[in-house]
């Protein structure tokens, strides 16, 4: 039996057993990253799509995703890969090969490598190796994450991370309970990352879950206590996966934007 130290779930795994995230597995008495290099998505995206509004705007970044996630959001936008165990993933792409591809695309406007689509932190060893290679070649590095990671692996990654977009899915633990997550882990990730790299935060507003204006006021006030210059993306939900509530009312998104702007300098709307 081995214990995973990557996130607050701390899965106890027998050999051959997958963790809650599906991307880590017990093997020979240790927990190893089983999804490393097994890419389910690879695309040259605008940086703004991550979303990053104030990090090299107008540029592109090679964006890679694998499978697995350490939350279980019933409205997941990428559930086909987030909740997969990787059996359908393609062959393994080495860190060297992936970074070579990022470098090859520089003449097409690429500034580096982003890990996104699923949860990148569950493959932090692979991410770390890729990012170390990127920095050795002058390429930028980006992580799009739910922020559910323990402090030690986060601090290791932050040494070679240039930017993060971190999901803040709600302002109370009872919201995270419905996602099998931990709010304090996410707040710690935002706090530590904001000291080390460029950080932007995204809140997807889901009707009946996290659509309180007073909660948004508290969230924005807390972010401003770290820095009023942290950009906040307030995004509109659409029905997806197991969640079938109607799409978020556009007027609510703009109301939330006005509330957040009382505290933050840069507030953006998404999916409107």
Image (spheres, rainbow, N blue to C red):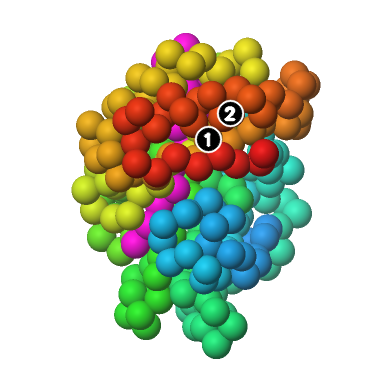
The percent position of residue 19, horizontal first and vertical second, equals: 53, 36
Q: Residues within 10 Å of mark 1 (few under 14, many from 20)?
A: many
Tally the numbered discs. Answer: 2
Q: What residue sits right under mark 2 in the picture?
A: 253
Quarter of the image where one finds residue 42: bottom right
The vertical placement of 47 against 21, above or below, is below
Closer to us: 70 or 146: 146
Name the residue located 30 percent from the left edge and 45 percent from the top edge.
229
Q: Which mark is residue 75?
A: none
The vertical placement of 184 against 153, above or below, is above
Name the residue located 58 percent from the left edge and 55 percent from the top edge.
49
Name the residue located 69 percent from the left edge and 24 percent from the top edge.
249
The vertical placement of 2 against 251, above or below, is below
Q: Quick check: can you spot residue 13? A: no
Q: Secondary structure at mark 2?
A: helix
- Looking at the image, tell me whether mark 2 or mark 1 is earlier in sequence order: 1
Q: What residue sits right under mark 1 in the picture?
A: 234
The percent position of residue 142, horizontal first and vertical second, equals: 43, 60
Chain part drawn in magenta: 162-177
- Residue 244 belongs to magenta span: no
- In the picture provided, is 86 more to the left or to the right than 260? right
The percent position of residue 30, horizontal first and vertical second, equals: 40, 46
Closer to us: 1 or 4: 4
Q: Secondary structure at mark 1?
A: strand
Q: Are marks 2 and 1 in contact (CB under 8 Å)?
A: yes
Name the residue located 68 percent from the left edge and 58 percent from the top edge.
40
């Amino acid at each position: 039996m081995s214990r995973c130290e990557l996130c607050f779930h701390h899965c106890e795994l027998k050999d051959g057993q997958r963790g809650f995230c599906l991307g880590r597995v017990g093997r020979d008495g240790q927990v190893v990253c089983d999804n490393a290099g097994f890419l389910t998505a690879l695309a040259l995206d605008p940086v703004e799509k991550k979303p990053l509004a104030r990090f090299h705007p107008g540029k592109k970044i090679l964006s890679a995703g694998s499978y697995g996630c350490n939350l279980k959001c019933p409205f997941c936008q990428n559930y086909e890969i987030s909740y997969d165990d990787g059996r359908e993933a393609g062959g393994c792409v080495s860190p060297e090969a992936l970074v070579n591809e990022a470098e090859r695309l520089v003449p097409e406007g690429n500034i580096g490598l982003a890990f996104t689509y699923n949860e990148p932190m569950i493959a932090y060893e692979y991410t770390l190796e890729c990012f170390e290679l990127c920095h050795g070649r002058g390429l930028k590095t980006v992580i799009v994450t739910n922020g559910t990671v323990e402090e030690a692996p986060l601090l290791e990654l932050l040494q070679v991370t240039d930017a993060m977009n971190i999901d803040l899915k709600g302002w109370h633990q009872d919201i995270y309970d419905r996602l099998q997550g931990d709010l304090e882990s996410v707040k710690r990730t935002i706090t530590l990352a904001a000291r080390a790299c460029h950080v932007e935060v995204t809140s997807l507003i889901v009707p009946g879950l996290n659509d309180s204006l007073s909660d948004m006021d508290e969230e924005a006030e807390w972010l401003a206590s770290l820095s009023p210059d942290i950009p906040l993306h307030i995004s509109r939900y659409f029905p997806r996966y197991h969640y079938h509530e109607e799409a978020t009312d556009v007027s609510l998104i703009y109301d939330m934007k006005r509330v957040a702007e009382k505290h933050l300098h840069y507030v953006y709307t998404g999916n409107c």
